[in-house]
Image (cartoon, rainbow, N blue to C red):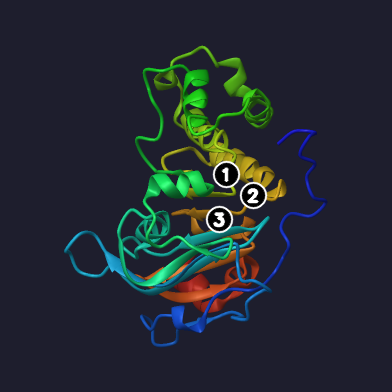
Amino acid sequence: MSSSNPYQDDRGNKDRSITNPAGQGTAMPRSKSGPVTSAPGGPFLIGEAMTGGYGKGPDILHECTIAVDRGEIAVIVGPNGAGKSTAMKAVFGMLDVRSGRVLLDGEDITALTPQDRVVKGMGFVPQTHNIFTSMTVEENLEMGAFIRKDDFRDTMAQVYDLFPILKEKRYQAAGELSGGQRQQVAVGRALMTKPKVLMLDEPTAGVSPIVMDELFDRIIEVARTGIPILMVEQNARQALEIADKGYVLVQGRNAFTDTGKALMADPEVRRSFLGG
């Protein structure tokens, strides 16, 4: 995000390791996946063969597997009600994973609370209610550093480098900003924790195409610093264009898993999920 974090010449490591075969679902008759061999040590973050739901309710996820490695952008796409955000929340510990597990850098964190996962290095940006509207932009960013005991001014400078409009409006109430600027505040606040992995739930929901492109550009810049990004997106085509890895979910199951480029080129994926 700044000169102290030089970007890689090429985004992501282009590793095609995907998932454990046990995580592949059966929702579609011709469902298929990409490579399933794991990289040495496995992905940096993986929700493996997750089955679960909310409280005592029925299972929403069915042996669903999603993963992301260092420097990658992994996106979760699929039709409405496919369980995309639910899968993200399962990885973050916001619903019961009745079977399966979540590993962060090789450590089993399945039993940890969301708060403990933040301490472990997970940054999560929910789709809505993700900023403090009555607080200034800078106060929102300071709130993001609540778990830190070191000097976070360098991180704040990096966030301002990434989102220059936030520096310009740093003393303005966050609730007065546009939708796209609010999303920048939310992402910036998550980055203030110095996360090891960044999770974004529909970051471009409700913004214009121009703002969406700008947000995706900034997401790419974050990935270039080496931070893995796991993202749920309704704008499937645009998300897969920037993705190293893509997961298409249907009814809480993995329907297709491959690189973003391969999924974009798959005729069945294009016909069923990308509008032809």
8 to the left or right of 200: right
Q: Are marks 3 and 1 in contact (CB under 8 Å)?
A: no
Q: Quadrant of the N terminus?
A: top right
In this view, the residue in front, 30 or 68, is 68
Instruction: Tell me, yes or no, if residue 249 can be seen here.
Output: yes
The residue under the point 58% across, 61% down is 105
The residue under the point 57% across, 37% down is 191
Question: Looking at this rendering, what residue extends furthest in the left direction?
Answer: 56
Q: Which comes before the other along the chain, label 3 or label 1?
A: 1
Query: What's the amino acid at mark 2?
Result: Ile
In the structure shown, which secondary structural element does the residue marked by tag 2 occupy? loop
Q: Are marks 1 and 2 in contact (CB under 8 Å)?
A: yes
- For disc 3, the neighbor class at 10 Å (few under 14, some 14 to 19, many from 20) is many
In the picture of the structure, the residue carrying the numbered disc 3 is 239
Instruction: Tell me, yes or no, if residue 123 can be seen here.
Output: no
Q: Label 2, label 3: how many angstroms apart (C-alpha)? A: 17 Å
Query: What's the amino acid at mark 1?
Result: Pro
Q: Which comes before the other along the chain, label 2 or label 3?
A: 2
Question: Looking at this rendering, what residue extends furthest in the front direction?
Answer: 149
Residue 69: x and y in percent read 63, 62
In this view, the residue in front, 213 or 187, is 187
Is 217 located above or below residue 192 in the figure? Answer: below
In the picture of the structure, the residue carrying the numbered disc 1 is 195
In the structure shown, which secondary structural element does the residue marked by tag 1 occupy? loop
The residue under the point 48% across, 73% down is 271
Residue 23: x and y in percent read 45, 78
Q: Label 3, label 1: how many angstroms apart (C-alpha)? A: 22 Å
In this view, the residue in front, 221 or 155, is 155
- For disc 2, the neighbor class at 10 Å (few under 14, some 14 to 19, many from 20) is many
Q: Which comes before the other along the chain, label 1 or label 2?
A: 1
